[in-house]
Amino acid sequence: MPEDFKRYFWDVAFEELSWEKNQRFIVERLLNYSTVKEIKWLITAAGKKYIKTVVKNSRNLNVKTKNYWNVMLTPVSRKSI
């Protein structure tokens, strides 16, 4: 993970975080608190499919964040427009 992401992990030892071991925690934290820059990185690193799974099953995302990502990650059907 980029070093500037450290600000989002104030309560853990950033140096000990491992993408392989802590992926779900990292995704949840970035979805809750990060900006567009970090989300772009996250989509590239984790993929939309995995992020959708985390949003669907997470108990660590706040309600507003969960609703937002459910809307943002759901494709809009042209028939409904």
Image: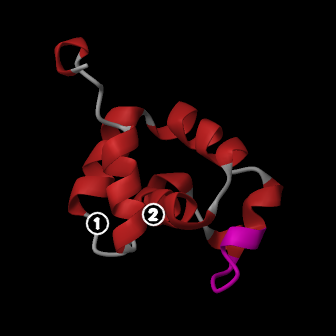
Q: Nearer the viewer, residue 31 or 24?
A: 31
Q: Is residue 11 above or below residue 19?
A: below
- Indicate left or right for 55 with 32 as reference: left
Q: Residue furthest bottom?
A: 11
Mark positioned earlier in the residue sequence (2 or 1):
2
Q: Taken as a whole, is the magenta stretch helix, strand or loop?
A: loop
The label shown at residue 66 is none
- Indicate left or right for 50 with 80 as reference: right
Q: Residues within 10 Å of mark 1 (few under 14, many from 20)?
A: some
What amino acid is found at the position of numbered circle 2 in the picture? Glu
* Residue 67 inside the magenta-drawn segment: no
Residue positioned 56% across, 43% down in the render: 42
Check the picture and name the quadrant holding the C terminus.
top left
Q: Residue furthest top?
A: 78
Find out whether the residues at labels 2 and 1 contact each other: C-beta distance under 8 Å: yes
Q: Is residue 14 above or below residue 34?
A: below
- Indicate left or right for 17 with 21 as reference: right
Q: Which residue is mark 2?
A: 28
Residue positioned 65% across, 71% down in the render: 16
Question: Which residue range is magenta in the image?
Answer: 7-13
- Asked which secondary structure carries label 1, the reply is loop
The label shown at residue 58 is 1
Q: Is residue 16 above or below residue 11?
A: above
Q: Position of residue 36 (x, y in %)?
A: 66, 44
CA distance separating discs 2 and 1: 8 Å
Q: Position of residue 41 (x, y in %)?
A: 64, 39
Q: Position of residue 69 (x, y in %)?
A: 39, 50
* Residue 9 inside the magenta-drawn segment: yes
